[in-house]
Image (tube, coloured by chain):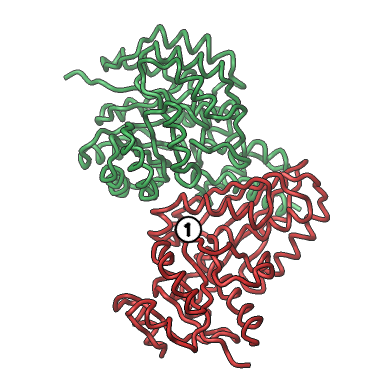
Chain colours: A red, B green
Amino acid sequence: MEKVGVAIIGPGNIGSDLMYKIRRSKYLEMKVMAGIVESEGIKRARGLGIETTINGISDILDRRDIKIVFDATGAKAHLKHAPLLREAGKIAIDMTPAAVGPYVVPCVNLALLSNEMNFNMVTCGGQATVPIAYAINQAADSIYTEIVSCISSKSAGPGTRANIDEFTETTARALEQVAGADQGKAIIVLNPAEPPLMMTNTIYSIVRNPDGEKIAAAVSAIVDEIRKYVPGYKLRTQPIIDDHKVTVIVEVEGAGDFLPKYAGNLDIINAAAVEVAEKLAAERFGG
Amino acid sequence: MKREVRLVDVTLRDGSHAVSHSFTKEQAAGIARGLDESGVDIIEISHGDGLGGSSINYGRSGTPEMELIDAVSGVVKNARLGALLLPGIGTIRNLEEAYDHGVRALRVATHVTEADVAIQHIRVAKEKGMFVCGFLMMVHMAEPDKILEQARIFEEAGADYVNLADSAGHLTPDEVRRRISVLREGLHIPVGFHAHNNLGLAIANSLAAIEEGASYIDGSLRGLGAGAGNAQMEVLQAVLQQSGIQSRANLDRLLEVAEKEVQPIMHRPQVIDTDSLMLGYAGVYSSFLLHAKRASKQFGVTTKDVLMELGRRKMVGGQEDMIVDVAYELSQNRK
């Protein structure tokens, strides 16, 4: 099959890691890295022989060979980019908290969004916890689901730090809207330990039907799905059932493409974004 | 020169851990009324883990904290009514709600190396005209220079003072002195101190902090708080008087509130048992204590082993979920 052309706007840490992941893809072809200034990320892309531009989104809109655009800039920029990309007929994969389009967690709800042109990747913690929360809800009907994500301080960039409420609020909403809990809550903790700790996530759920075997089977099945695009995703505990409370702890080790392995938080949101793009490439462009 | 300190009472906040977040409106109002009459400067109230802390991870509040704040705001006439907020747990929305219910002092708490996550919350609170403190937790885990760098982030964001919390009750008086003195020299705003008594040093450490120039000191009636509790407020006041240090509080009144309002509602004596000693010794966040006792029972391992492993893993405040992880792992390894 012919690979589907993609571009990335925003050559920072997220954008650079995406670029490495896309270069490995069997379905996607990395066409352009777009920035607004001559930066390390632009040089890095050029060093890999990838076409670059510092004119931002404008050089991408007219490119017929680019079907999918990853926006790794910021929420404000994406609010401007989203209508332009839609008008140009390009699929937008939004890595920012702008949430112009619906939240997508590929192993949970991508199949339900067949007419969408703009996909929001939620948060790193959302990508790590929503699948488990969804599996628990499917098996046991969640009244309340709460997650705690712990990431290493080094992997929390200035954007996350300046808008930490966005993480808790967005992730909580995704637990309700995507995972299906009646009510969601999210907590994030930064840990500065050296060497940096792997990302850990704890999912607690108060459920109506605490059938241990059913829950364990559903969780195990979804973990297999996630591991297809995040090989470093694993259960630290089997589901622990205590009356109506279910507890699952997962760890995310990154692929170490561009970012270090401890940055599993950044890896999982990027891997999920590439997974979305690959599925769409196959479905919509006959890849 | 006569020293003077401001007293910050945390009975209704840190003490919330010791009663598993079960304060009722009547209890909170009774304690707050007595504290207000006794002359403490700030009365802090919220879930033990700050606004929005009610959760499976930290324990659910028996009474919603806004109802507790309402019950208290009506009786507090002289002191500032305060709340704690931990970014990552509580949000600006929680802050605004607390303000609407009468909270006028806010302490924004982060791990000792993560001050920048609090900038947005400090700014919003200052815009509302609140009295704001930047609160660094687990200060035993960083050296004085690093703490100063982080404290300056709070100062630049507009905090009215910076508070250091020995959240694990791990520091000795000399270590407290090193930290407070560097902050006093390097900051333009006042410095405060929050002790835990896990090694029996809460009062001694508070005194050491005052001698190095700390002017805001946390305490709680009967020492009610996480782990072995905090600096016991009525003891602190007695020691201040003996040392010729001024505060606005009245010892007799503090004794009366402690005895009549706090003593009867305590779930257990606030003593240094083996497990709380281990918190201090291993440098573990004091609020982990009751959760660790529960998880140890659930998985058939000892609390001491769980706490030592948590210390070895360098877990920080808020990582209560890792208590289950550790207890589970210890129980699996034994099989």
User: Up-down: is B162 above or below A155?
Assistant: above
Image coords of residue B229 (percent x, y): 50, 27
**In which quadrant of the rendered view does residue B272 lie?**
top right
**Is residue A14 visible to the viewer in this orientation of the structure?**
no
**Is residue B62 visible to the viewer in this orientation of the structure?**
yes
Q: Identify the residue shown where x is 60% and y is 65%.
A: A104
User: Up-down: is B315 above or below B230?
Assistant: below
**In which quadrant of the rendered view does residue B138 lie?**
top left
User: Up-down: is A281 above or below A124?
Assistant: below
Check the picture and name the quadrant holding the N terminus of chain A. bottom right
Residue B185 appears left or right of A140: left
Residue B1 vs residue A104, the one in the foreground = A104
Q: Which residue is mark 1?
A: A152
Check the picture and name the quadrant holding the C terminus of chain A. bottom right
Residue B309 vs residue A89, the one in the foreground = A89
Q: Identify the residue shown where x is 41% and y is 90%.
A: A49
Q: Identify the residue shown where x is 82% and y is 56%.
A: A214
Image coords of residue A178 (percent x, y): 65, 58
Image coords of residue A264 (percent x, y): 54, 65
Residue A163 vs residue B223, the one in the foreground = A163
Outermost residue on the left side: it is: B1
